[in-house]
Amino acid sequence: MTTLFDPSSSFDSSLPSFDTLMTMALTNPEGFERLRQQEVDALIASAPEEIQQRLRGLQFQIDAQRQIHKTPMGACIKISNMMHESFAQLRELLSQFSQQRAPLIARTSEAPSSAVLETAEIIDFPSR
């Protein structure tokens, strides 16, 4: 069975291994936090400029949840709930869009293509 995430492998070869990161988190939490923040900042900086502000806002919300909750598990559950709420909103928007498009698709697929052309108006442009 294949797993989606193998903690022993690293997504970025410049990052230490999972075991090294876990040891660092336990023995040097300040250093681990600096590394985490550097990686988050680098990832946001690598995103297209038009979405960087949104990503910074999202990261602010994530960091706030990490500070509010007394345990990492509590923060993880809250952040996971935020993600599920976001997906639910996206699913609702996609559903609404699909429902709005469905009548348009049905109408255009039933009408012969020549009917659309018959209603077109040709405009003459003056020659130069």
Image: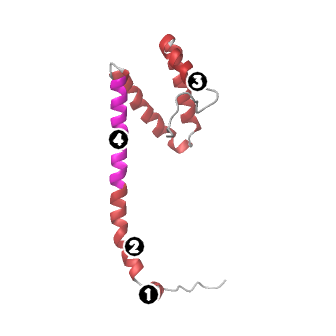
Q: Which residue is mark 3?
A: 17
| Amino acid at the residue labelled 3 | Ser
Q: CA distance from mark 3 to mark 1?
A: 64 Å
First of labels 4, 1 by sequence position: 4
Query: Which-is-in-front pick, marks 4 and 1?
Result: 4
Q: Is residue 68 left or right of residue 14?
A: left
User: Quick one: 19 or 35, which is closer to the camera?
Assistant: 19
Q: Which residue is mark 4?
A: 84
User: Which span of residues is magenta-colored?
Assistant: 73-93
| Residue tagged 2 | 105
Q: Residues within 10 Å of mark 1 (few under 14, many from 20)?
A: few
Kind of residue at badge 4 = His
Which mark is on residue 115?
1
| Comparing labels 2 and 4, the label whose residue is closer to the camera | 4
Q: Nearer the viewer, mark 3 or mark 4?
A: 3
The kind of secondary structure element at disc 2 is helix
